Image (cartoon, rainbow, N blue to C red):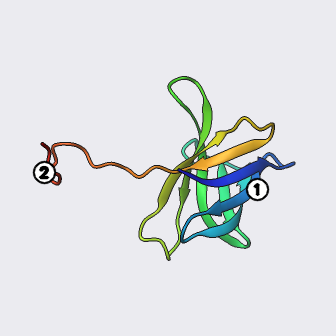
Amino acid sequence: MLIGKFTKTETSGFRGVIHTLTLNAEVTFEPITDKTKDQMPDFRLSAGDIEIGAAWKKSSEAGTAYLSVNIDDPSLPAPIQCAMVKTGAEHGYSLVWERRRKAKGNGNSSEF
C-alpha cells in the first residue's frame, strides 16, 4: 500500500508527504553524516521539528536498493515499518507499507 511520495533533496535526503487515514504529515529524511557504528540509521525522519523515525539503506535479494523505514509516535499503537523505493519518475520515491501476516499453523486461524 502506497502511504507516501517523496523527492530527493539537494542534501541527498528526501522530502515528501506521508498520508494514511490517521497520519498526514510533511516529512523529511535527513542523512546522518556522523555515523559511528554500521547498525546506526542512515537517515533521521522529521515532521517539522519533531523526530518521528529512522531509515537504513538496504538491498533486496535482486540487488535493488531501498530504505527500510521505521516510523514511531506516541499516538500510534505500534511503530510502522515500511520501505522507500525508487519509482519510474526521474526523482520520485514511494513509501510503501504492508501489514504483516500471521504465520500459518499458529492456531489463530481456521483453515478448510
Q: Which residue is mark 1?
A: 15
Judge whether 108 appears above or below 50 on screen. above
Q: Which residue is mark 2?
A: 107
Question: x, y percentage for residue 58?
Answer: 57, 36
Q: What label sits on residue 28 in the rendered view?
A: none
- Relative placement, left or right, of 42 versus 77 is right
Q: Amino acid at mark 2?
A: Gly
Q: Is residue 68 visible?
A: yes
- Mark 2 falls on what kind of element? loop
Q: Amino acid at mark 1?
A: Arg
Quadrant of the rendered image containing residue 59 = top right
At a point 52% along the width and 65% down the height, the residue shown is 72
- Mark 1 falls on what kind of element? strand
In the orientation shown, which residue stands out farthest toward the bottom? 75
Identify the image quadrant of the C terminus: top left
Question: x, y percentage for residue 10?
Answer: 87, 48
Closer to the camera in the image, 68 or 42: 68
